[in-house]
Amino acid sequence: MTDASSPRSRTRATADSASFSVSLERGLRILSAFGGDRSVLGIADLARAVGLNKSTTYRYVATLAKLEYIRQDPETKKYFLGPRVIDLGFAAIDSMELTKVAGPLLQALADETGFTVSMGLCDGPDVVYVDRRRSGRRSPLAMDLNLHVGSRLPAYCTSMGKVLLAYKDPAALRQILDRTEMARRGPKTITNREQFLAALAKVRQSAVAVNDEELAPGLRSFAAPVRDRSGGVVAAVNVAVHLTMSPTSVEALSGRVEPSLRRAAAEISRRLGYRG
């Protein structure tokens, strides 16, 4: 006889409730199967993990893939978490140590420079925006591409993306670039892989990435890495400037923006425990 207070009994009681969706529960179990050293799974792996047969598992997986909660590797046919799973976590991101620590410093940087400041994380070939601050003296001519917390941009043609990719392990970087279509987005987009790798090498040397009209015409940005206590690059901070706001050379603009950007990124890193 099963104890009515046991986890199994409580689960069964919940499942018997008219308000309980078995389909939703199964879909969430499939998503929860990914994690740790199980970031890439096949149908058989998922079926074992969630306790369903392969055909049933496949139906749920196909639906989740269509909705972009998971993606399939075209070569191995295995699955990994997709971009929409990241979007689900943005309510939690607001309470993360990183954004709590960085928020006031990002706003101070925006107010000091007069330009829009953002912080992003790397999600495969994309940069995901987790904070965005505008200066109180922001020009109405500024171009911000309608970006907001949760927005995603290709890493290869953004300054934050360059920073985040520059410090990737070579094997991980190769996998990301293999999934990246380096299409021309702006008049100066780097579309050649070897040239892009050379640009990343410069980022590692200078610890600042420059984007000169690579994402969109007239848009420039500068980004610096944020490190955690282990020294790993966990985020990037950028300052974005449109030519309508500052019609000057990249070098002159860099001299104006970079010192403040470096100080802000270094202070965020310090508060996260980095002592490099």
Image (spheres, grey):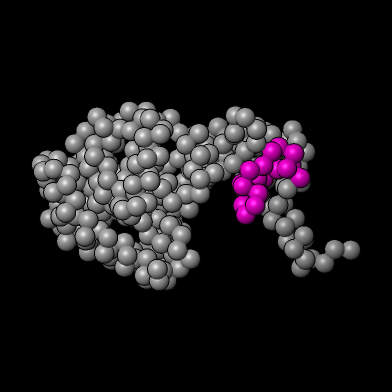
Looking at the image, is 119 positioned above or below residue 191? below
Q: In this view, does 217 lie to the left or right of 29?
A: left
Which quadrant of the figure has residue 76?
top right
Which contiguous range is marked in magenta? 26-48
Indicate the quadrant containing the C terminus: top left, top right, bottom left or bottom right. Answer: bottom left
Tell me what residue is drawn at x 43 percent, y 57 percent: 233
Q: Could you tell whether 9 is left or right of 229 in the image? A: right
Residue at the location (36% across, 35% down)?
195
Q: Is residue 176 above or below residue 254?
A: above
The quarter of the picture where the N terminus appears is: bottom right
Q: Residue at x 51, y 49 (%)?
A: 169
Give residue 57's position: percent from left, percent from top: 70, 38
Residue 107 place in picture, x, y as percent: 24, 61
Hey, which residue is sitting farthest right in the picture? 1
Viewer-proximal residue among 38 and 189? 189
**Residue situated in front as seen by the camera: 204 or 106:** 204
Image coordinates of residue 251 in percent, x first then y, are 17, 47
Residue 43 lies within the magenta run: yes
User: Position of 186 compared to 180: left or right?
Assistant: left
Q: Image point 40% across, 39% down: which residue?
A: 197
In the rendered image, residue 221, in percent from the top left (x then y), is placed at: 25, 46
Residue 9 in view in this figure: yes
Q: Does the magenta stretch include residue 29?
A: yes
Residue 83 visible to the viewer? no
The foreground one among 197 and 37 is: 197
Image-quadrant location for residue 48: top right
